[in-house]
Image (cartoon, grey):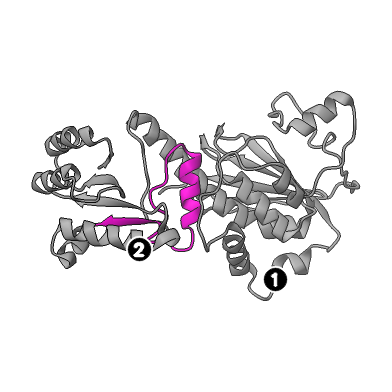
Amino acid sequence: MSSACFAGTTTTRGYHLTSSTACGAASATATAPSAARSPRKTITNFPRRSSAMTTTTTTTRAAAAAAGEHLAYEKCLALLASTPPTVALPYHPTQTVQNVVRIALEEDVANVGDVSSLSTIPEDLRATATLLAKADGVLAGEHLANEILSIVDEDIEAFWQKRDGEEIERGEIFCYLRGSARGILRAERVVLNFMQRMSGIATLTKKMSEAAKPARILETRKTVPGLRVIDKWAVLIGGGENHRMGLFDMVMIKDNHVAAARGIKNALASSTTFLIEGGEKYEGVMIELETRTMEEVREVCGLLEDAGTDTSRVQRVMLDNMSMEDMRDAAGVLNKFGGETEA
């Protein structure tokens, strides 16, 4: 999975720091300090718009501007509650976004802290930052970035110009940040790392999904350890669909299981019995059968036709590493049973 590239720009009282993720390059420049301005806590006054600036899509902000009101900007944590993600996070019973984010932040500062910022930036220094696209693509990670910011410093304000799933162009600013300089710099790299990866996945997924229609694109379990929920979320944002989340939410009978059970029929029977006897614990858990040859496809079709075989939990049949000719033949045979075919 490749990644779209982004850059983060932070301005602190005239000191202009730029970090670029393109090809791993990084640069920093300094300009003469300008007069400090007191931070504003209104969403109507920031950022200042120009003809080249994308108008925010936040309804509250547009309404406030129309009425000429100065409404206090909600903290990021409150924003999460009032602005649900455009694409819901896929369910996992034990893994949460908060856990993933905390691990990423701890990885960056350990139990010490950001020694660069702590040693050079005054604690009360305020800053603004812009996040801009380094390539065309699909934005993904907006809601995750809000989560990161709320954990680092809930007083950091985020002004999103684009939302998850929307297309962005190279050079386009898609978010403005304002708040503690230390907090922004601590969050910046973690935000960009997640958004780079998620936007790259979403961008490629959209391309493949559009090309594959009317077929649907599903991903696999071949994800970075610890980031499965995030990677699968990005697939959804890009217009793809999730396969099973893990080994716990779908029975996938592959060649190893068939060999151990001494045949597809035995493997299917034992899996079905296991799920039924498990009761509510396995309610909704379905079965996918892998086939590698036309002979195995015909065997599965025989089981689906057999009134004495319980196939109520069979949701999908996989055609694994078959030739195009065999896949066409297999799909034609399986379509009359009304289930799903995966290749």
Q: Residue at x 82, y 43 (%)?
A: 73
Of 13 and 175, the residue lying toward us: 175
Q: Earlier in the sequence, mark 2 or mark 1?
A: 1
- Image location (x, y in percent) of residue 243: 38, 48
Asked whether residue 293 appears in the rendered view, the answer is no
- Residue found at the very far left of the displayed protein: 295
Residue 226 falls left or right of residue 74: left
Question: Can you tell which mark lies on residue 277?
Answer: 2
- Quick one: SS at disc 2? helix
- Image location (x, y in percent) of residue 111: 66, 76
Q: Nearer the viewer, mark 2 or mark 1?
A: 2
**Quadrant of image for the C terminus:** top left
- Residue found at the very far bottom of the displayed protein: 111
- Image location (x, y in percent) of residue 239: 46, 36
Q: Which contiguous range is marked in magenta?
A: 225-253
Q: Residue at x 90, y 35 (%)?
A: 70
Q: Amino acid at mark 2?
A: Glu
Residue 141 falls left or right of residue 62: left
Residue 200 falls left or right of residue 309: right
Of 91 and 201, the residue lying toward us: 91
- Image location (x, y in percent) of residue 319: 20, 45
Number of other residues with Cα within 10 Å of mark 1, as a class: few under 14, some 14 to 19, many 20 or more: few
Q: Amino acid at mark 1?
A: Gly
Question: Can you tell which mark lies on residue 337?
Answer: none
Asked whether residue 140 appears in the rendered view, the answer is yes
Q: Mark 1 sits on what residue?
A: 113
Q: Splitting the image into 4 quarters, where does residue 121 fall?
A: bottom right
* Mark pair 2, 1: CA separation: 51 Å
- Quick one: SS at disc 1? loop
Residue 338 highlighted magenta (yes or no): no
Q: Residue at x 69, y 41 (%)?
A: 83
Q: Residue at x 46, y 49 (%)?
A: 232
